[in-house]
Amino acid sequence: MLSGCKVGAIVFFVSDLARSVAFYRDTLGLPVEVIEGHDGAFAMAQVGELSLVFIAQPVRAGESPVVVFSLDGGIDDYAEALAAKGVEIVVPVGESPDGGLSLDFVDPDRNALSLHQDAGRPRRR
């Protein structure tokens, strides 16, 4: 079902955004940008075509990092297909911090996974 998708981002929930920005920027040398989203500030760094996203929020074991699969569209179709296969959806389709749409679910070991599509893409294929 996701074989045509690519991993577009890895999302890290962090306890201190400024500390994480400093680590990834100053220690690891990645270009990190702090962005003001509709739910508050978050940060992004690029590693090739892969985005690292840092969101300040309380973190519990097993919830971070989140592997995010990028979609060209059809997120509602993917949501229905996952639910039909018995996949536990932990956050239904909704607006993501960047204005696109996302859906969060877990694998059998409760590892967090997400689907994301950019704003303006069709919700159905």
Image: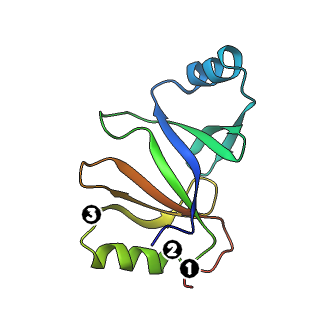
What residue type is disc 1 on? Arg
Q: Which sits in the foreground, 39 or 33?
A: 33
Separation of marks 2 and 1 at Cα, in angstroms: 5 Å
Give me the residue at 35% from left, 41% from top.
63
Picture coordinates of residue 8 (x, y %)?
61, 53
The mark total stands at 3
Task: Identify the secondary structure beneath mark 2.
Answer: helix
Task: Identify the secondary structure beneath mark 1.
Answer: loop
Task: Please name the residue that numbered disc 2 is placed on.
Answer: 75
Q: Are marks 2 and 1 in contact (CB under 8 Å)?
A: yes
What residue type is disc 2 on? Ile
Query: Of the residues under marks 2 and 1, which one precedes in the sequence?
Result: 2
Quarter assignment of residue 45: top right
Q: From what the image shows, is residue 117 above or below residue 21?
A: below
Query: Of the residues under marks 2 and 3, which one precedes in the sequence?
Result: 2
Q: Which sits in the foreground, 34 or 52?
A: 52
Task: Identify the secondary structure beneath mark 3.
Answer: loop
Badge 3 crowding class, 10 Å Cα cut-off, few under 14, some 14 to 19, many 20 or more, is some
Picture coordinates of residue 122 (x, y %)?
62, 80
Give me the residue at 40% from left, 74% from top.
79
Instruction: Find residue 123 and name its label.
Output: 1
What residue type is disc 3 on? Glu
Separation of marks 2 and 3 at Cα, in angstroms: 16 Å
Q: Are marks 2 and 3 in contact (CB under 8 Å)?
A: no
Left-right relation of 7 to 94:
right
Picture coordinates of residue 13 (x, y %)?
46, 36
Task: Please name the residue that numbered disc 3 is placed on.
Answer: 88
Q: From what the image shows, is residue 32 above or below residue 121?
A: above
